[in-house]
Image: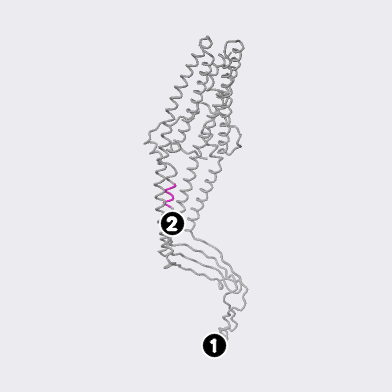
Amino acid sequence: MLRRLSLFVIGSAILVGSATARAQTLDSIAHIAITNNLAVRRTHERERQADAEIDRARGMFLPSIGVDARYSEVSGVVNIGDFINPAYATLNKLTGTNSFPTNVNATLPTQQETRLRSTLPVFNAALFANLDAARSTRTLRGAERAAAIRRLDATSRISYLDWARASRAVDIWDATLPVLVENARVSQCLVDAGSATPDVVLHARADLADAEQQRAEAARTRDAALGALNLLLDRAPSEPVASLADSAVPVAPTITFADALASSAQREERAMAGAAIDGARAAGRAASSAFVPSVALAFDYGVQGNGYHFDRDHDVAVASIVLQWNLFNGGQDVARRESAAAAREDATIQRADVDRQIALDVRTTWDAVQVARAAVASAQARLDAARAAFKLIDRRYNEGLTSHLEWSDAHARLTAAELNEVVTRYTLAARGVDLERAAALRTIPKN
């Protein structure tokens, strides 16, 4: 019985659970995370805000039309008639006519003034700088959103691999525990029959207790990884996910370091640094625009007076060319230009620092993939050797040519080799995902 059960474990431990589990691809996990993640949704809203700011900056070049209306109750104000009426009365006496009115009643300001005003900028350098600044901000927000998606794409897939790795470890322990339970029972039977010493039972019980402890730790790691994954997916911490089929475990990219470094030029952080430089440059142009005049056209049409009379005798039209030029404001414009120049230099230095950080990131992740790939080869060789050794020892044990203690040690080495193979295989997949992120090898999914 023990031999049949052990051989079943050897042949199926790696495949436990995969036959009945629904296949889950990493791309689908990443898609769910990108669609539901709150941080990514926030970057989308910031991107929309930047789009609106571009529209606002463009609108400043177009004519503006508005209505101004005022109606006032006046008291104690100057009445021009008090000055004009006596003069007109004297003129009437001198001419012997009533040609000049003597009842003029005109107060300043008038009781009402209603006008339609339209303005159109003809030349304003600040408007062009403002539009360039809005465009650089839009580029920055778009790059921030793309960078957030790339990070989340990698983080969610790595989190899923961590959960899958822990789940497979639990599966292996679940398949191993019945063997160890049977091992302890058989050991007790051998002692009762006088075919073995009591230390065999103690050794078997110790193996069983150790396996139960490690199984509990593996289950804790699995549940913690599930909680972390569901947090990225914006779901309940304990909500289950489908298992990953062996065929769906991603293969780490095979790429030279030089090619990986060249591909990293597509990283969104570089675009973010470039947008920051463009924004500082636009701020500098906006500051410099204060040293040149701005010209605009203005047109007013309306009525004014002490009452509302909408006719040709009471309407007023004014067309103006407006020039503004600030000749001196205490050196504020010079200070703004110096501040923008410092900001541009700071952004340039930041871009150089980003380049160095990306190069280090690529180097670190590329080295990790090479080490993990070598570890997978070693782990597979170790597993093959452990399986072959256990098969031989199991045959000798059933023929009574080796001790139960030697059989138990061989089985423990086989279980350890199986666990190590699972860990290294999933670790290589996770390192490959991280390299894809660092070198920008993967096309960013759209949400």
Query: Is residue 273 found inside the magenta-colored segment of the image?
Result: yes
- Residue drawn at x 45%, y 54% is 133
Q: Which mark is residue 422?
A: none
Residues in magenta? 272-278
Image location (x, y in percent) of residue 265: 40, 41
For discs 1 and 2, the disc positioned in front in the rendered view: 2
> Please, what secondary structure does the residue beneath circle 2 have?
helix
Quarter of image, res 227: top right
Residue topped by disc 1:
91
Q: Is residue 90 toward the left or the right of residue 135 in the image?
A: right
159 vs 276, nearest the viewer: 159
- Residue drawn at x 57%, y 12% is 196
Q: What distance separates the C-alpha of mark 1 from that of mark 2?
A: 64 Å
User: Eyeballing the image, is 406 above or below 227?
Assistant: above
N-term mark: 1 or 2? 1
Image location (x, y in percent) of residue 291: 40, 64
Image location (x, y in percent) of residue 220: 58, 31
Tell me the kind of residue under disc 1.
Leu
Quadrant including the N terminus? top right
Q: Is residue 357 toward the left or the right of residue 418 in the image?
A: left
Q: Say whether marks 1 and 2 touch (CB < 8 Å).
A: no
> Please, what secondary structure does the residue beneath circle 1 have?
helix
Image location (x, y in percent) of residue 268: 44, 43
